[in-house]
Amino acid sequence: MSSFPTSARAVIIGGGVIGCSVAYHLAKLGWRDVVLLEQGRLTCGTTWHAAGLVGQLRAHHNMTRIVQYSAALYQALEAETGQATGWKQCGSVLVARTPERVTLFKRIHAAARAQGVACEIISPQEAGERYPVMRTDDLLGALWLPDDAKVNPADVTQALAKGARMNGARIFEQTRVTAIHQKNGVATGVATPRGDIAAEVVINCAGQWAKAVGRLAGVTVPLHSAEHMYIVTGRIEGVHPDLPVLRDPDGYIYVKEEVGGLLMGGFEPVAKPWAMDGIPENFEFGMLPDDWDQFQILMENALIRLPCLEKAEIKTFMNGPESFTPDNNWIMGPAPELKNFYVAAGFNSIGIASGGGAGRALAEWIVEGEPTLDLWPVDIRRFARFHDNDALLKERVSEVLGLHYMMPWPNRELMSARPLRRSPLYDRLYAQHALFGSKMGWERPNFFASSAADARIDYSWERQNWFPYAAVEHKATREAVTVADLTSFAKFLVQGRDAEAALQHLCANDVAVPVGTTIYTGLLNARGTYESDLTVARLGADRFMLVTGTGQATRDADWIRRNLPEGKNVTLTDITSAYAVLAVNGPRARDLLSRLTKAPLDNAAFPFGAIREIGIGYATVLASRRTYVGELGWELYVPTEYAAGVYDLLMEAGAAFGARNLGYYAVESLRLEKGYRAWGRELTPDYNPYEAGLSFAVKLDKPFLGRDALLAAKNNPPARRLLSFVATSPDTPIAHGGELVLRDGEPVGDIASAAYGHTVGGVVALGYAKTGGVRVDDAWLSARFEIDIAGERVPVRASLKAPYDPKGEKLK
Ligand SMILES: Cc1cc2nc3c(=O)[nH]c(=O)nc-3n(C[C@H](O)[C@H](O)[C@H](O)COP(=O)(O)OP(=O)(O)OC[C@H]3O[C@@H](n4cnc5c(N)ncnc54)[C@H](O)[C@@H]3O)c2cc1C
């Protein structure tokens, strides 16, 4: 027995699959002094009762890569540690009961090709051959994923723990962390009943307890427990260990073989939150009471799919809690509130499948100081302080669990815990039949319907019901003028004597510009890839306003604060709530604004990129001559209390010019026609400015973070290149993003964003294509490009240029 340590390089809190995987990988990366503390026994939280399915294909490339790594690791761990993991590559069969699900399967099949995952479309009959105890006469389609597997979760965890120990990590059970020590905003260690441990790094892998552990440190870990259930039957004839895993998402269920019987569980549409008043003390290897009422919907569906269950003996009803997050993705990364404190928790029922890869990704993040691949879908910084609200979490969790098998419709919106953050214009826009979507808690108008009854989304893979409304808004922006409520933009003030120098260090573009100028720039990491893209507005000699995407508020503030040079006179303040943003876009934008202000708006007095204080009626606002739609226009930064008045003036005066409201769906089609990139899709830590085609916003003649990497990358043709795609054939189906891109019949990439471009009259999209190291030129682009939209190969024109690119007078 090793003596209890008083210091360690890293202390990991929690001995489930995640904590053990982080310990294993930190030790593998050479960190010798790693200590893991578990309040009970290893696996005693959620891990011990997991079903153990390892499904590889995920919605995001890097999440797939993470599970693929888990799979490879779980196969190899026994040879390395002597501890078996129960790995069995049995494959999985997915079945479809509806035509919409069949369409989804075709999309999944193409996505699998883009992601390098083996996947086959099979008939219901073939599915039945692979799963003879299943009923198939009511099925419309099926998928076969041969690489999917099952494991024994407790054994995987023990193998990871053993591997960690073999590499020097120490694990202490029955040791609860009761406090997190910190000094000057930096985590310095933990307290336990056995004594304190000073640590360089503290890692919260406490599963459903991670919210409470986070609160000990003032760190937001927005997750909530929900009951999650399965049954295990006695032996059933025809059921054997080689049966694949079966998923019937239209019936909400999954099924795997277990000791000659079936384990059947699922994701019911309305889940049951648990532990509203906190998790009971000593909930170790804990189970919750059977709840057949809650389980009924799963049981009914299972009886349809597996008539053999009718007579089967139910040996176990397993009801165990698992933690779920507001968006059904797990939470990982450095806490923005506390340096040297990391989190990996909230695994939404895929912690076993993700565990190996997630542990490695976090360990790399800790060791390297930044992740080695884009982890934005699970990055802790996609949340903000307001997410740590118990009422919000409880309501949201009821909805989130069911998302696993719900149709992932394009534009799907979550409905719970809304409306949350409302712009001052919310009521006015609501009265005009705005349909709101939610981002970072903000209610944002997606489109404006012609009646209250039509302000809804009828989900489908085809043109959705809002198509004509967005078309009108799109056209009005190109031909007249529109007003968009972009209040949810995150805004920061960066101020101080050293503000310019600090921003020059952070920004790839040159921001040492005259007062009254705005600059579009990327914020890059040491690899020269994107951490953010934003607009910097110089408001004074030592005062800059940064405007960034709605979802990036926490992430960008964290990135900037972490990278501000030490000891300099510069501060960052989030002023998002201080300003509403009204974008006035379109060829008549100047005519409209000229009716409301005496400020000169002509090209000489107010050129593109300028920002000035102007009067609009009685209100004084900041007007910035930029748009995200490729037209003449201004973004007005209006102090919140004036926003409603300014909006009213704009709409009244705008009537003469045909002014309309503009929603986010039309903004999306407008920006894609103009080839404008979006953070999180075209711009991520996986891509640099040369790949993204944004070298114009990089100034290599001054030092900045990421410059060395760009200097190295500059002279070689990028391995991937962002391209615009257009399909104008009238019968082209709608693309939604994620579609496979083929060049001369070979997969070369996939679509990041897509929409219907009403000006070009067809599908417009942006996506990366592998270049094979060749410089992209007209000859390369003249090859046969296609995108696979649900199994249909659609010819597209590929281009480095924007599909819609007005120049000269139109923009003046
Ligand atoms: C019924 C069910 C079926 C599932 N099936 C699957 C599946 O098929 N595939 C899949 O991938 N996933 C599945 N899951 C999900 C999976 O079990 C979890 O995502 C995963 O186990 C989470 O692991 P963890 O390490 O984050 O949490 P846990 O296993 O809960 O580990 C956290 C640990 O932290 C410890 N801890 C908490 N607070 C402290 C403290 N203050 N000090 C010290 N220690 C502390 C706890 O005791 C606990 O052991 C299933 C879950 C359920 C409930």
Image (spheres, rainbow, N blue to C red):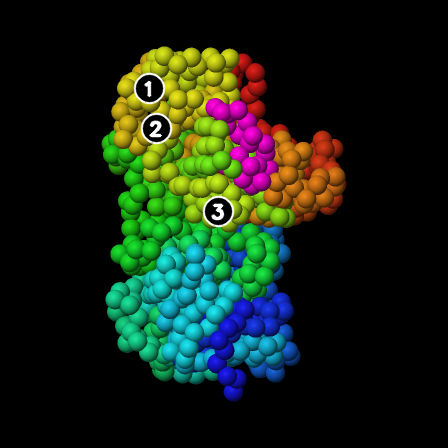
Secondary-structure class at tag 3 = helix
Is residue 589 shown above or below 353? above
Mark 3 vs mark 1, foreground winner is 3
Q: Earlier in the sequence, mark 3 or mark 1?
A: 3
The percent position of residue 189, horizontal first and vertical second, equals 45, 68
Which of the numbered marks, if any, corresponds to residue 616? Answer: 1
| Distance (Cα) linking label 2 and label 1 | 10 Å
Which x, y percent locates residue 474? 43, 27
Say the numbered circle drawn on residue 561: 3
Residue flagged by tag 1: what amino acid is it?
Ile
Residue located at (61% from left, 76% from top)? 167
Which of the two residues, 165 or 587, is positioned nearer the viewer here?
165
Secondary structure, mark 1, is strand
Residue 275 at x, y percent in the picture:
28, 68
- Left or right: 490, with 767 as reference point: left
- For label 2, the residue is 638
> What is the three-letter code of the residue carrying label 2?
Val
Which x, y percent locates residue 73?
Answer: 60, 70
Residue at image location 42% in from the left, 38% down from the top: 492
Residues drawn in magenta: 499-519
Look at the numbered disc 2 and give the secondary structure of its residue.
strand
